[in-house]
Amino acid sequence: MLFFIIVFIIVIILIMLYYSDLKLRIEYKKTYDCNVITIYLTSLYGIIRYGIKLPPEDLLYKMQKYLIKLERRKIIKKEIEFIIPQTIDEVIDVIKKYRQKYLLKKNAINYILKKMSFHEFSLYIKYGLFDAYITGILYGFIYSVLICIATFIKAYCDLDLKRIDIKPIFNEYIFEMEFNCIITIKVGDIITGLKKFLNSSKGSDMDGTNYRRSYENNYGKY
């Protein structure tokens, strides 16, 4: 009897978790002596809580390492070096790389985006260059890019835009930024999205790498 009660409680908890919201609060602050990102995660109506605070480089390193582990389905023993692009060519290569990944998983990404909601979205940028003319031109460029990004997010997700503030400082070299946003999505939608990701990964393995190797072996040499 006790066994069935325990099973019943576990099932109820799993159902509650499946239909509960996962709330992700992201805070980023970049100043002269500070460069840190803070992430708070809550779920199951506030019962599950987790927080992390670290520099962006360390966060990107951890994400890259986890993604490689996830793709290979095994623990990577060697250290993975996350390389930050330093030149325009490297930036273009990174964009092309992630664009290819996006096209492979487009349906899964679009599904998750449609299920996400962005609340209290605020961005503050304070920047300056010694050249006042370039600083003024850069103001219009940054503002246009941010509006395009906000419009793109608005087209796919529920966006609550609180503030976008850009403050140019003339004849002084400075860059500061503060970003805050709360992202909510149901746990059940995340599970469905992960299934779509896995299905797209299997499809890319069947239609991509294996086919190219066979094609190159048969027709690649003359």
Image: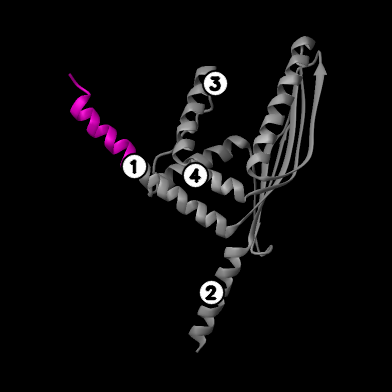
First in sequence: mark 4 vs mark 2: 2
Marks 4 & 3, CB-CB < 8 Å contact: no
* Residue under label 3: 86
Foreground residue among 153 and 57: 153
Marks 1 & 3, CB-CB < 8 Å contact: no
Task: State how many labels appear.
Answer: 4
Look at 23% across and 34% down and name the residue there: 214
Specify whether residue 3 is painted magenta: no
- Per the rendered image, the range of residues in magenta is 206-222
* Residue under label 4: 107
> Residue 180: x percent and y percent?
73, 41
Secondary structure under the numbered disc 4 in the rendered image: helix
* Residue under label 1: 205
* Residue under label 2: 11
- Going by the numbered disc 2, the residue's amino acid type is Val
For this view, does 142 lie left or right of residue 106?
Answer: right
- Going by the numbered disc 4, the residue's amino acid type is Asn
In the image, residue 58 above or below residue 129: below
CA separation in Å, label 1 and label 3: 31 Å
User: Quick one: label 2, few (<14), some, or many (20+) residues within 10 Å?
Assistant: few
* Labels 1, 3: front one: 1
Residue farthest to the front? 155
Name the dominant secondary structure of the magenta segment.
helix
CA separation in Å, label 2 and label 3: 50 Å
First in sequence: mark 1 vs mark 3: 3
Quarter the C terminus occupies: top left
